[in-house]
Image: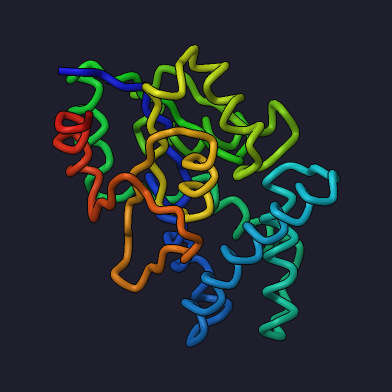
Amino acid sequence: MKTYTLAFDIYGTLIDTSGVSVAVRQYVKDNTDDFVQLWRSKQLEYSFRKGLMGKYEDFGVCTAQALDYCCLAFNILLSAQEKERLMLEYKVLPKFEEVEGALSALKDAGHRLFAFSNGSNEALYHLLDHAGIYDTFEKVISMKDIAMFKPHPSGYQHFLDKAGAEVQQAFLISSNPFDIIGAASYGMHTAWVRRSKNSIFDPWGIQPNYVLSSLLELQAVLAGHG
């Protein structure tokens, strides 16, 4: 069986960003889901905008500024300590249920597994270690190394360089359409993890090679690829 170099996005793909809802609910109550969704949306938007402006800041800064925006949008006054507590929740977000088993099976099959994220190395270590999957990966590759955010093309070359892989043998696995489109545009194979039936893939004329409802489907996909 062929083996591949697998780049796993972290936030929203392996790690459930909605896991922050429990902590948010005590401050937002009935609007928890809307608050969490806006927080995630603004987090990504701010990273895109900073990348385009050439004004890179750590992904954690984007997350904190997005939280500030949400407090303004929902007219919620949080103290510095309360905001810090919510920020700390991003270090202990839960993994999706099938992740650990799926990654272990892929590793046992001989595939090379890498974590690939906009988050900093420090943040990713805490997150993946807390989730119990840090040691599953051969290496954690952060976009902070090049002061840029996905889906900038330089990020995918950065991954290939750090992983020592050829683009033809590399897969990007992500729940984020922007990441899939970025990797596909760079020539990588892609698998979109559709974490929700309500998720819509951007109609840009670029499609993922595979659409998964669970990471447990990935091993069979790779076995049949090519």
Q: Position of residue 202 (x, y in %)?
A: 48, 64
Choose top left, top right, bottom left or bottom right for residue 16.
bottom left
Residue appearing at x 50%, y 83% in the figure = 29
Q: Looking at this rendering, what residue extends furthest in the front direction?
A: 205
Display colour scheme: rainbow
**Which of 48 and 76 lies nearest the eye of the viewer?**
48
Q: How many marks?
A: 0
**Which of 73 and 219 lies nearest the eye of the viewer?**
219
Residue appearing at x 21%, y 18% in the figure = 2
Q: Looking at this rendering, what residue extends furthest in the top direction?
A: 164
Q: Position of residue 52 (x, y in %)?
A: 78, 50
Choose top left, top right, bottom left or bottom right for residue 112.
top left
Q: Position of residue 26 (x, y in %)?
A: 52, 75
Residue appearing at x 52%, y 71% in the figure = 37
Choose top left, top right, bottom left or bottom right for residue 158.
top right
Q: Does residue 149 appear to the left or right of 214 in the view shown?
A: right
